[in-house]
Amino acid sequence: MNDSADRRILKEDVDDFGTQLETWRLRMEAALAARLPPADVVPARLHEAMRYSVLGGGKRIRPALVFATARAVGLSEDEVEAAACAIELVHVYSLVHDDLPAMDNDDMRRGRPTCHKAYDEATALLVGDALQPLAFQLLARDPKLPASPAIRLRLIDMLAQAIGTLGMAGGQAIDLAVQGRRLDIGQVEDMHARKTGAVIQASVLMAAECAPPLDPNLYNALLRFANAVGLAFQIQDDLLDVMGDASMLGKATGADSERAKPTHPAIIGISASQQRVRLLHGQAIHALAPFGERAEALRSLAHWLLSRQY
Ligand code: IPE
Ligand code: IPE
Ligand code: MG
Ligand code: MG
Ligand code: MG
């Protein structure tokens, strides 16, 4: 297949999948709204800030990965909805803290003032503090999650691992420590695997964990897929910081170079970074081969991510 034919097929696939993503996004909006504390219950300001931060924005890519993986392993969306909510809640907590003056010091998120701008810094800290346990509580007791106590425990362990020092929090610590330093690309990719890759990996593997045990070949296929997509996702985020449109992204651009973050575009340039993303996309698609048709939604999601502009 020549390159232009390849691109044409990709575009049709991506357009169709946009409708599926929108359906999942709306489902998540309702699912999250139902699980967050009501804004008129004490402490009302904290509850209001939690709802402000979680609802009404975001691509909901991690939930989409949960739903697409559910399809690949033969589960319904209903069966994994609570797990998708748990993952999105910890993701939002990571964004609220990431935007704080002590971290990236950003004013805009998802097209609106960041939580600490709309409320105040102490409230933003507490929003993160409260979203995190809510996520684990869903895994422990959400009635929609038809999982045995053993599986619930495993999901709690997986999410804890993904956001702890080996995952998101550790990656964020490295991100702050290396500002202004020159890293090699291997070190940058190790940081990305933790700060962004770990939660993306958990989105895929936690959905798989809700199904009867998978053949190790299939499990490894999902693991390889998730790792490639997770790394590509952060490289693209860093590319969009250089080349993206702030109004489309809903957040500032140029922020990484302002803070001298060692990123792919800063170290190897735009075109080599784009090439790295395409290579990872190819690896992600290749990894799904053992699933055949069942992984169609995961493939489409990977195609959509490859051409994302926000
Ligand atoms: C932004 O994540 C932070 C990164 C890990 C790169 P998203 O691009 O998924 O942000 P939302 O959830 O759509 O706002
Ligand atoms: C954030 O990476 C990763 C997280 C764990 C939240 P960035 O700092 O690049 O994310 P944005 O660009 O602010 O969304
Ligand atoms: Mg950051
Ligand atoms: Mg940031
Ligand atoms: Mg960024």
Image (spheres, rainbow, N blue to C red):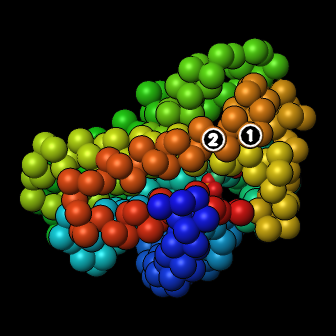
The crowd level at tag 2 (other Cα within 10 Å; few <14, some 14-19, many 20+) is few
Residue 140 appears in the figure: no
Is residue 206 left or right of 210 when viewed as pictured? right
Ligand 5 within 8 Å, label 1 CB: no
The quadrant in which residue 159 appears is: top left
Q: Residue at x 76, y 51 (%)?
A: 240
> How far apart are labels 2 and 1 at the CA level?
6 Å
Q: Which mark is residue 197?
A: none
Q: Residue at x 30, y 76 (%)?
A: 77
For the C terminus, which image quadrant? bottom right
Is residue 169 left or right of 52 when viewed as pictured? left
Question: Residue 239 versus residue 164: which sits nearer the camera?
Answer: 239
The crowd level at tag 1 (other Cα within 10 Å; few <14, some 14-19, many 20+) is few
Question: Residue 279 versus residue 81: which sits nearer the camera?
Answer: 279
x and y, in percent, of residue 58 in the image: 63, 67
- In the rendered view, tell whether residue 197 sits above or below residue 286: above
Badge 2 is on which residue? 275
Q: Residue at x 66, y 71 (%)?
A: 57
Instruction: Tell me which amino acid carries mark 2.
Output: Gln
x and y, in percent, of residue 269 in the image: 78, 33
Q: Are marks 2 and 1 in contact (CB under 8 Å)?
A: yes
- In the rendered view, tell whether residue 121 sits above or below residue 59: above
x and y, in percent, of residue 280 in the image: 50, 43
Badge 1 is on which residue? 271
Q: Disc 2 on helix, strand or loop?
A: helix
Instruction: Tell me which amino acid carries mark 1.
Output: Ser
Q: Residue at x 50, y 33 (%)?
A: 194
